[in-house]
Amino acid sequence: MPEEPADARPVHDVLGVGFGPSNLALAIAIAEHNAGDREDEQRTEPVSALFLERQPRFGWHRGMLIDDATMQVSFLKDLVTMRNPTSEFSFLSYLHSADRLVDFINQKSLFPLRIEFHDYLEWAAARLDEVVRYGREVIAVEPVTEDGVVVCFDVIARHGADTTTYRARNVVFGLGLEPHLPEGVRLTERVWHNRDLLTRVERLDTSPRRVAVVGAGQSAAEVTKFLHDRFPEAEVCGVFSRYGYSPSDDSPFANRVFDPEAVDHFYLAADPVKEMILGYHGNTNYSVVDIDLIEELYRRTYQEKVLGRPRLRLFNVSRVVETVEDGENVRTTVESLATGEKTVLDCDVVVYATGYRPVDPLRLLGDLAALCHRDERGRPVVARDYRVDTDEALRGGVYLQGSTEHSHGISSSLLSTTAVRVDQILRSITARRTAPLAFSGWSAP
Protein backbone atom coordinates (compact mmCIF):
# COMPACT_ATOMS: atom_id res chain seq x y z
CA MET A 1 0.00 0.00 0.00
CA PRO A 2 1.56 3.35 -0.98
CA GLU A 3 2.17 5.91 1.73
CA GLU A 4 0.15 9.07 2.04
CA PRO A 5 1.83 12.15 0.55
CA ALA A 6 4.13 13.87 3.01
CA ASP A 7 1.98 16.99 3.20
CA ALA A 8 -1.07 14.85 4.10
CA ARG A 9 0.51 13.26 7.17
CA PRO A 10 -0.71 14.26 10.61
CA VAL A 11 1.91 15.96 12.73
CA HIS A 12 1.93 14.47 16.21
CA ASP A 13 3.17 16.46 19.16
CA VAL A 14 4.85 13.31 20.50
CA LEU A 15 6.18 10.22 18.77
CA GLY A 16 7.37 7.62 21.27
CA VAL A 17 9.93 5.07 20.07
CA GLY A 18 9.37 1.97 22.17
CA PHE A 19 6.43 1.16 24.41
CA GLY A 20 7.88 -0.25 27.58
CA PRO A 21 6.93 1.01 31.06
CA SER A 22 8.50 4.45 30.55
CA ASN A 23 6.67 5.41 27.37
CA LEU A 24 3.54 3.67 28.63
CA ALA A 25 3.67 6.00 31.63
CA LEU A 26 4.10 8.94 29.25
CA ALA A 27 1.08 7.81 27.21
CA ILE A 28 -0.99 7.73 30.41
CA ALA A 29 0.20 11.19 31.43
CA ILE A 30 -0.77 12.53 28.01
CA ALA A 31 -4.20 10.85 28.17
CA GLU A 32 -4.86 12.36 31.60
CA HIS A 33 -3.57 15.75 30.45
CA ASN A 34 -5.96 15.68 27.50
CA ALA A 35 -8.86 14.63 29.73
CA GLY A 36 -8.11 17.44 32.19
CA ASP A 37 -8.10 14.97 35.07
CA ARG A 38 -5.74 17.02 37.19
CA GLU A 39 -7.07 20.06 39.03
CA ASP A 40 -3.64 21.67 38.84
CA GLU A 41 -3.23 20.87 35.14
CA GLN A 42 -2.53 23.96 33.13
CA ARG A 43 -5.26 24.36 30.53
CA THR A 44 -3.57 23.89 27.19
CA GLU A 45 -4.45 22.35 23.87
CA PRO A 46 -4.60 18.55 23.77
CA VAL A 47 -1.35 16.75 23.01
CA SER A 48 -1.47 14.33 20.10
CA ALA A 49 0.75 11.29 20.55
CA LEU A 50 1.62 8.01 18.90
CA PHE A 51 3.92 5.23 20.11
CA LEU A 52 5.73 2.63 18.01
CA GLU A 53 6.76 -0.74 19.45
CA ARG A 54 8.64 -3.45 17.58
CA GLN A 55 7.18 -6.30 19.65
CA PRO A 56 3.88 -7.75 18.41
CA ARG A 57 2.26 -7.00 21.78
CA PHE A 58 3.15 -5.40 25.07
CA GLY A 59 5.86 -7.24 26.97
CA TRP A 60 8.43 -6.39 29.64
CA HIS A 61 11.16 -8.93 30.44
CA ARG A 62 8.79 -11.81 29.74
CA GLY A 63 11.65 -14.29 29.85
CA MET A 64 12.15 -13.61 33.57
CA LEU A 65 8.55 -13.76 34.76
CA ILE A 66 9.36 -16.54 37.21
CA ASP A 67 6.28 -17.50 39.21
CA ASP A 68 7.62 -16.62 42.67
CA ALA A 69 9.87 -13.68 41.75
CA THR A 70 8.84 -10.39 43.34
CA MET A 71 9.43 -6.79 42.40
CA GLN A 72 12.31 -4.94 44.06
CA VAL A 73 10.40 -1.68 44.04
CA SER A 74 7.27 -0.66 45.94
CA PHE A 75 3.95 -0.89 44.10
CA LEU A 76 3.48 2.80 44.96
CA LYS A 77 6.19 3.53 42.41
CA ASP A 78 3.90 2.38 39.63
CA LEU A 79 3.20 4.18 36.37
CA VAL A 80 1.26 7.07 37.90
CA THR A 81 0.98 7.34 41.69
CA MET A 82 3.91 9.67 42.36
CA ARG A 83 2.58 11.99 39.65
CA ASN A 84 -1.16 11.62 40.22
CA PRO A 85 -2.24 9.57 43.26
CA THR A 86 -5.89 9.66 42.11
CA SER A 87 -5.18 8.16 38.69
CA GLU A 88 -7.38 5.37 37.36
CA PHE A 89 -4.19 3.76 36.01
CA SER A 90 -2.66 3.03 39.42
CA PHE A 91 -1.65 -0.42 40.62
CA LEU A 92 -4.37 -0.18 43.27
CA SER A 93 -6.96 0.52 40.58
CA TYR A 94 -5.72 -2.54 38.72
CA LEU A 95 -6.07 -4.67 41.88
CA HIS A 96 -9.58 -3.36 42.40
CA SER A 97 -10.54 -4.22 38.82
CA ALA A 98 -9.12 -7.73 39.32
CA ASP A 99 -11.02 -8.15 42.63
CA ARG A 100 -7.75 -8.70 44.54
CA LEU A 101 -7.40 -5.44 46.45
CA VAL A 102 -8.38 -6.87 49.84
CA ASP A 103 -6.23 -9.95 49.32
CA PHE A 104 -3.22 -7.84 48.42
CA ILE A 105 -3.69 -5.66 51.50
CA ASN A 106 -3.90 -8.73 53.73
CA GLN A 107 -0.51 -10.03 52.62
CA LYS A 108 1.10 -6.90 54.10
CA SER A 109 3.70 -6.41 51.40
CA LEU A 110 4.81 -3.47 49.31
CA PHE A 111 6.29 -5.77 46.68
CA PRO A 112 3.96 -7.61 44.29
CA LEU A 113 4.90 -10.66 42.31
CA ARG A 114 6.73 -9.69 39.14
CA ILE A 115 4.23 -11.61 37.03
CA GLU A 116 1.42 -9.68 38.71
CA PHE A 117 3.08 -6.34 38.06
CA HIS A 118 3.54 -7.34 34.43
CA ASP A 119 -0.19 -8.10 34.27
CA TYR A 120 -0.80 -4.59 35.64
CA LEU A 121 1.36 -3.12 32.87
CA GLU A 122 -0.55 -5.12 30.24
CA TRP A 123 -3.84 -3.97 31.77
CA ALA A 124 -2.74 -0.34 31.51
CA ALA A 125 -1.35 -0.76 27.98
CA ALA A 126 -4.58 -2.37 26.76
CA ARG A 127 -6.49 0.78 27.76
CA LEU A 128 -4.30 2.83 25.43
CA ASP A 129 -4.33 0.61 22.35
CA GLU A 130 -5.44 3.48 20.16
CA VAL A 131 -2.16 5.37 20.60
CA VAL A 132 0.29 2.52 20.03
CA ARG A 133 1.22 0.58 16.90
CA TYR A 134 2.76 -2.80 17.65
CA GLY A 135 4.98 -4.68 15.24
CA ARG A 136 6.61 -1.41 14.14
CA GLU A 137 10.41 -1.31 14.27
CA VAL A 138 11.79 2.20 13.91
CA ILE A 139 14.70 2.13 11.47
CA ALA A 140 15.39 5.83 10.88
CA VAL A 141 14.53 9.37 11.94
CA GLU A 142 14.82 12.05 9.29
CA PRO A 143 14.59 15.84 9.51
CA VAL A 144 11.72 17.99 8.28
CA THR A 145 13.02 21.50 7.74
CA GLU A 146 11.62 24.99 7.30
CA ASP A 147 14.02 27.77 6.34
CA GLY A 148 16.99 25.57 7.20
CA VAL A 149 15.69 24.71 10.68
CA VAL A 150 14.58 21.21 11.71
CA VAL A 151 11.07 21.78 13.00
CA CYS A 152 9.93 18.18 13.23
CA PHE A 153 10.85 14.62 12.31
CA ASP A 154 9.82 11.89 9.93
CA VAL A 155 10.05 8.61 11.82
CA ILE A 156 10.30 5.59 9.51
CA ALA A 157 9.10 2.25 10.85
CA ARG A 158 9.28 -1.18 9.29
CA HIS A 159 6.45 -3.68 9.60
CA GLY A 160 6.95 -6.86 7.65
CA ALA A 161 8.05 -5.98 4.13
CA ASP A 162 6.53 -2.50 4.32
CA THR A 163 7.54 0.81 5.87
CA THR A 164 5.44 3.68 7.14
CA THR A 165 6.53 7.23 7.90
CA TYR A 166 5.13 9.14 10.86
CA ARG A 167 5.69 12.84 11.48
CA ALA A 168 6.15 14.46 14.89
CA ARG A 169 7.41 17.63 16.53
CA ASN A 170 9.03 15.72 19.38
CA VAL A 171 10.54 12.24 19.58
CA VAL A 172 10.79 10.43 22.91
CA PHE A 173 13.19 7.49 22.91
CA GLY A 174 12.33 4.70 25.33
CA LEU A 175 14.62 2.04 23.88
CA GLY A 176 15.30 0.11 27.07
CA LEU A 177 18.48 -1.89 27.55
CA GLU A 178 20.38 -4.52 25.60
CA PRO A 179 21.66 -7.79 27.10
CA HIS A 180 25.32 -7.65 28.04
CA LEU A 181 27.61 -10.62 27.43
CA PRO A 182 31.31 -11.07 28.23
CA GLU A 183 33.64 -10.55 25.33
CA GLY A 184 33.70 -13.50 22.96
CA VAL A 185 30.47 -15.09 24.18
CA ARG A 186 27.95 -15.93 21.48
CA LEU A 187 24.36 -16.98 22.15
CA THR A 188 23.36 -20.40 20.82
CA GLU A 189 20.73 -23.04 21.52
CA ARG A 190 22.72 -24.04 24.62
CA VAL A 191 24.29 -20.73 25.62
CA TRP A 192 21.61 -18.28 26.77
CA HIS A 193 21.16 -14.86 28.26
CA ASN A 194 18.70 -14.87 31.16
CA ARG A 195 16.46 -12.51 29.18
CA ASP A 196 15.23 -15.59 27.30
CA LEU A 197 15.18 -18.00 30.24
CA LEU A 198 11.55 -19.16 30.28
CA THR A 199 11.26 -19.36 26.50
CA ARG A 200 14.45 -21.40 26.25
CA VAL A 201 13.53 -23.74 29.10
CA GLU A 202 10.22 -24.58 27.47
CA ARG A 203 12.05 -25.62 24.30
CA LEU A 204 14.25 -28.20 26.03
CA ASP A 205 13.54 -31.73 24.84
CA THR A 206 14.97 -33.40 27.93
CA SER A 207 15.82 -32.37 31.45
CA PRO A 208 19.44 -31.20 31.74
CA ARG A 209 21.96 -33.05 33.86
CA ARG A 210 24.05 -29.98 34.61
CA VAL A 211 23.57 -26.26 34.04
CA ALA A 212 25.82 -23.32 34.82
CA VAL A 213 24.66 -19.82 35.70
CA VAL A 214 27.18 -16.98 35.28
CA GLY A 215 26.62 -13.83 37.31
CA ALA A 216 26.23 -12.56 40.87
CA GLY A 217 23.21 -10.24 40.74
CA GLN A 218 19.52 -10.63 41.46
CA SER A 219 18.75 -12.19 38.09
CA ALA A 220 21.58 -14.72 38.44
CA ALA A 221 20.38 -15.76 41.89
CA GLU A 222 16.78 -16.03 40.65
CA VAL A 223 17.84 -18.14 37.68
CA THR A 224 19.92 -20.40 39.93
CA LYS A 225 16.98 -20.98 42.28
CA PHE A 226 14.55 -21.47 39.40
CA LEU A 227 16.70 -24.10 37.67
CA HIS A 228 17.36 -25.85 40.98
CA ASP A 229 13.59 -26.08 41.51
CA ARG A 230 12.67 -26.88 37.92
CA PHE A 231 15.12 -29.72 37.43
CA PRO A 232 15.35 -31.63 40.74
CA GLU A 233 17.86 -34.15 39.37
CA ALA A 234 20.19 -31.61 37.76
CA GLU A 235 23.39 -30.14 39.14
CA VAL A 236 23.22 -26.35 39.13
CA CYS A 237 26.53 -24.47 39.18
CA GLY A 238 26.73 -20.76 39.96
CA VAL A 239 29.87 -18.98 38.77
CA PHE A 240 30.76 -15.47 39.90
CA SER A 241 33.80 -13.36 40.66
CA ARG A 242 32.60 -12.23 44.09
CA TYR A 243 33.21 -14.20 47.26
CA GLY A 244 29.48 -14.56 47.69
CA TYR A 245 26.18 -13.03 46.69
CA SER A 246 26.04 -9.51 48.11
CA PRO A 247 22.83 -8.12 49.63
CA SER A 248 21.11 -5.12 48.13
CA ASP A 249 20.90 -2.01 50.26
CA ASP A 250 17.22 -1.16 50.48
CA SER A 251 17.45 0.67 53.79
CA PRO A 252 15.38 3.87 54.11
CA PHE A 253 18.22 6.37 53.94
CA ALA A 254 19.94 4.66 51.02
CA ASN A 255 16.62 4.51 49.18
CA ARG A 256 16.55 8.28 49.16
CA VAL A 257 18.85 8.07 46.15
CA PHE A 258 15.68 7.13 44.21
CA ASP A 259 13.65 10.12 45.43
CA PRO A 260 12.56 12.64 42.79
CA GLU A 261 14.48 15.42 44.50
CA ALA A 262 17.63 13.26 44.38
CA VAL A 263 17.53 13.72 40.60
CA ASP A 264 17.81 17.48 41.10
CA HIS A 265 20.72 17.07 43.49
CA PHE A 266 22.51 14.70 41.13
CA TYR A 267 21.90 16.81 38.04
CA LEU A 268 23.34 19.94 39.64
CA ALA A 269 26.35 18.17 41.16
CA ALA A 270 29.86 18.38 39.73
CA ASP A 271 31.06 15.35 37.79
CA PRO A 272 33.32 14.04 40.60
CA VAL A 273 30.35 14.14 42.97
CA LYS A 274 28.19 12.32 40.44
CA GLU A 275 30.79 9.55 40.23
CA MET A 276 31.00 9.41 44.00
CA ILE A 277 27.24 9.03 44.39
CA LEU A 278 27.08 6.28 41.77
CA GLY A 279 29.97 4.51 43.47
CA TYR A 280 28.53 4.77 46.96
CA HIS A 281 25.04 3.65 46.04
CA GLY A 282 25.57 1.16 43.24
CA ASN A 283 24.72 -1.52 45.80
CA THR A 284 21.12 -0.36 45.82
CA ASN A 285 20.68 -1.80 42.32
CA TYR A 286 23.71 -3.35 40.63
CA SER A 287 25.08 -6.88 41.16
CA VAL A 288 23.19 -7.31 44.42
CA VAL A 289 20.57 -9.78 45.66
CA ASP A 290 17.64 -9.68 48.06
CA ILE A 291 18.77 -11.01 51.42
CA ASP A 292 15.89 -13.52 51.61
CA LEU A 293 17.01 -15.12 48.35
CA ILE A 294 20.64 -15.22 49.51
CA GLU A 295 19.60 -16.99 52.70
CA GLU A 296 17.45 -19.47 50.78
CA LEU A 297 20.29 -20.43 48.44
CA TYR A 298 22.67 -20.81 51.38
CA ARG A 299 20.11 -22.96 53.21
CA ARG A 300 19.93 -25.25 50.18
CA THR A 301 23.68 -25.67 49.89
CA TYR A 302 23.96 -26.47 53.59
CA GLN A 303 21.04 -28.91 53.54
CA GLU A 304 22.53 -30.75 50.58
CA LYS A 305 25.90 -30.91 52.33
CA VAL A 306 24.27 -32.45 55.38
CA LEU A 307 22.42 -34.99 53.24
CA GLY A 308 25.51 -35.80 51.21
CA ARG A 309 23.82 -35.03 47.90
CA PRO A 310 25.23 -31.68 46.77
CA ARG A 311 23.82 -30.52 43.48
CA LEU A 312 23.86 -26.74 44.05
CA ARG A 313 27.54 -25.84 43.56
CA LEU A 314 28.83 -22.30 43.82
CA PHE A 315 32.15 -21.36 42.22
CA ASN A 316 33.01 -18.08 43.92
CA VAL A 317 35.95 -15.82 43.09
CA SER A 318 35.86 -17.50 39.69
CA ARG A 319 35.21 -16.84 36.05
CA VAL A 320 34.34 -18.77 32.92
CA VAL A 321 37.38 -18.72 30.65
CA GLU A 322 36.14 -20.98 27.86
CA THR A 323 32.99 -22.57 26.53
CA VAL A 324 33.19 -25.13 23.74
CA GLU A 325 30.08 -26.74 22.33
CA ASP A 326 30.54 -30.41 21.57
CA GLY A 327 27.41 -32.09 20.31
CA GLU A 328 24.84 -31.78 23.06
CA ASN A 329 27.28 -30.47 25.68
CA VAL A 330 28.87 -27.13 26.44
CA ARG A 331 32.31 -27.86 27.89
CA THR A 332 32.75 -24.97 30.32
CA THR A 333 36.09 -24.19 31.90
CA VAL A 334 35.89 -22.32 35.21
CA GLU A 335 39.03 -20.70 36.60
CA SER A 336 39.55 -19.72 40.22
CA LEU A 337 40.75 -16.12 40.38
CA ALA A 338 42.37 -16.88 43.73
CA THR A 339 44.38 -20.00 42.88
CA GLY A 340 44.29 -20.29 39.11
CA GLU A 341 42.87 -23.81 39.42
CA LYS A 342 40.64 -24.79 36.50
CA THR A 343 37.55 -26.96 36.64
CA VAL A 344 35.93 -28.38 33.52
CA LEU A 345 32.14 -28.73 33.63
CA ASP A 346 30.27 -30.58 30.91
CA CYS A 347 26.99 -28.62 30.87
CA ASP A 348 23.80 -29.05 28.93
CA VAL A 349 23.12 -25.32 29.22
CA VAL A 350 25.05 -22.21 30.26
CA VAL A 351 23.00 -19.16 31.26
CA TYR A 352 24.67 -15.74 31.33
CA ALA A 353 22.88 -13.51 33.82
CA THR A 354 25.40 -10.75 33.21
CA GLY A 355 23.09 -7.78 33.06
CA TYR A 356 22.20 -5.16 30.49
CA ARG A 357 23.78 -2.12 28.96
CA PRO A 358 22.12 1.04 27.60
CA VAL A 359 21.95 1.42 23.84
CA ASP A 360 23.04 4.58 22.07
CA PRO A 361 19.75 6.48 22.11
CA LEU A 362 20.77 8.66 19.17
CA ARG A 363 21.77 5.85 16.81
CA LEU A 364 18.53 6.14 14.85
CA LEU A 365 19.02 9.83 14.09
CA GLY A 366 21.49 9.41 11.24
CA ASP A 367 22.88 12.78 10.16
CA LEU A 368 20.69 14.49 12.76
CA ALA A 369 22.91 13.07 15.48
CA ALA A 370 25.59 15.59 14.47
CA LEU A 371 23.29 18.36 15.75
CA CYS A 372 23.06 16.72 19.19
CA HIS A 373 25.66 17.72 21.75
CA ARG A 374 27.80 15.11 23.51
CA ASP A 375 30.18 15.39 26.42
CA GLU A 376 33.88 14.52 26.37
CA ARG A 377 33.02 10.83 26.88
CA GLY A 378 30.63 10.74 23.95
CA ARG A 379 27.47 10.71 26.07
CA PRO A 380 24.46 12.87 25.14
CA VAL A 381 24.25 16.21 26.92
CA VAL A 382 20.77 16.16 28.43
CA ALA A 383 18.84 19.03 29.99
CA ARG A 384 17.03 18.65 33.29
CA ASP A 385 13.74 18.06 31.40
CA TYR A 386 15.35 15.04 29.63
CA ARG A 387 15.65 16.88 26.33
CA VAL A 388 18.90 16.39 24.43
CA ASP A 389 20.87 19.59 24.09
CA THR A 390 21.16 20.46 20.39
CA ASP A 391 22.29 23.08 17.94
CA GLU A 392 19.82 25.89 17.31
CA ALA A 393 19.19 24.40 13.86
CA LEU A 394 17.34 21.51 15.54
CA ARG A 395 14.15 22.96 16.97
CA GLY A 396 12.26 19.69 17.26
CA GLY A 397 12.59 18.02 20.65
CA VAL A 398 14.59 14.83 21.23
CA TYR A 399 13.83 13.38 24.68
CA LEU A 400 15.36 10.38 26.43
CA GLN A 401 13.80 7.88 28.80
CA GLY A 402 16.85 5.94 29.88
CA SER A 403 20.52 6.36 28.95
CA THR A 404 20.70 9.36 31.29
CA GLU A 405 22.33 7.83 34.36
CA HIS A 406 25.39 10.01 33.79
CA SER A 407 23.28 13.17 34.00
CA HIS A 408 20.21 12.28 36.09
CA GLY A 409 21.43 9.52 38.38
CA ILE A 410 20.89 5.89 39.19
CA SER A 411 17.10 5.93 38.84
CA SER A 412 17.13 6.98 35.18
CA SER A 413 16.47 3.47 33.87
CA LEU A 414 14.37 2.27 36.82
CA LEU A 415 10.71 2.46 37.73
CA SER A 416 11.34 4.57 40.83
CA THR A 417 10.97 8.01 39.22
CA THR A 418 9.16 7.07 36.01
CA ALA A 419 5.86 8.75 36.90
CA VAL A 420 7.61 11.99 37.87
CA ARG A 421 9.95 11.90 34.87
CA VAL A 422 7.16 11.63 32.30
CA ASP A 423 5.37 14.56 33.94
CA GLN A 424 8.51 16.65 33.50
CA ILE A 425 8.85 15.60 29.87
CA LEU A 426 5.20 16.36 29.13
CA ARG A 427 5.39 19.78 30.79
CA SER A 428 8.50 20.55 28.77
CA ILE A 429 6.78 19.59 25.52
CA THR A 430 3.67 21.64 26.23
CA ALA A 431 5.73 24.64 27.33
CA ARG A 432 7.79 24.57 24.13
CA ARG A 433 4.88 23.98 21.80
CA THR A 434 4.88 26.27 18.77
CA ALA A 435 2.08 27.14 16.38
CA PRO A 436 0.43 24.00 14.95
CA LEU A 437 1.58 22.73 11.58
CA ALA A 438 -0.80 21.68 8.82
CA PHE A 439 -2.94 18.69 9.76
CA SER A 440 -5.20 16.45 7.76
CA GLY A 441 -7.69 13.80 8.73
CA TRP A 442 -5.43 10.94 7.59
CA SER A 443 -4.97 8.35 10.32
CA ALA A 444 -1.84 6.29 10.85
CA PRO A 445 -2.07 2.64 9.82
Image: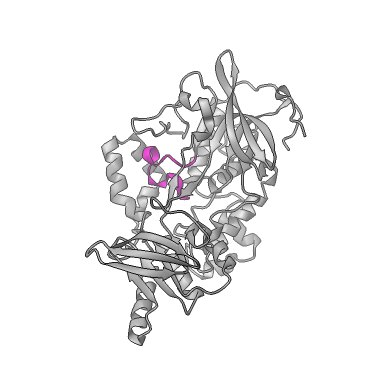
* The furthest residue to the top: 147
The stretch drawn in magenta includes residue 36: no
Q: Position of residue 188 (x, y in %)?
A: 51, 58
In the rendered image of this protein, does residue 168 appear above or below residue 191? Answer: above
In the rendered image of this protein, does residue 113 appear above or below residue 174? Answer: below
Which residue is rendered at x = 39% and y = 75% of the image?
Answer: 312
In-image side of 281 versus 33 (left or right):
left
Q: How many marks?
A: 0
Q: Position of residue 246 (x, y in %)?
A: 32, 62
Residue 219 seen in the figure = yes
* The furthest residue to the front: 326
Foreground residue, 332 or 226? 332
In the rendered image of this protein, does residue 101 appear above or below residue 357? Answer: below
Which residue is rendered at x = 46% and y = 24% of the image?
Answer: 370
Which residue is rendered at x = 66% and y = 22% of the image?
Answer: 437
The stretch drawn in magenta includes residue 410: yes
Residue 217 seen in the figure = no
In-image side of 333 versus 390 (left or right):
left
Foreground residue, 181 or 28? 181
Q: Position of residue 234 (x, y in %)?
A: 46, 76
**Quadrant containing the C terminus in the rendered view:** top right
Which residue is rendered at x = 57% and y = 36% of the image?
Answer: 41
* The furthest residue to the bottom: 307
Range of magenta residues = 401-416
In-image side of 110 versus 57 (left or right):
left
Q: Position of residue 14 (x, y in %)?
A: 60, 33
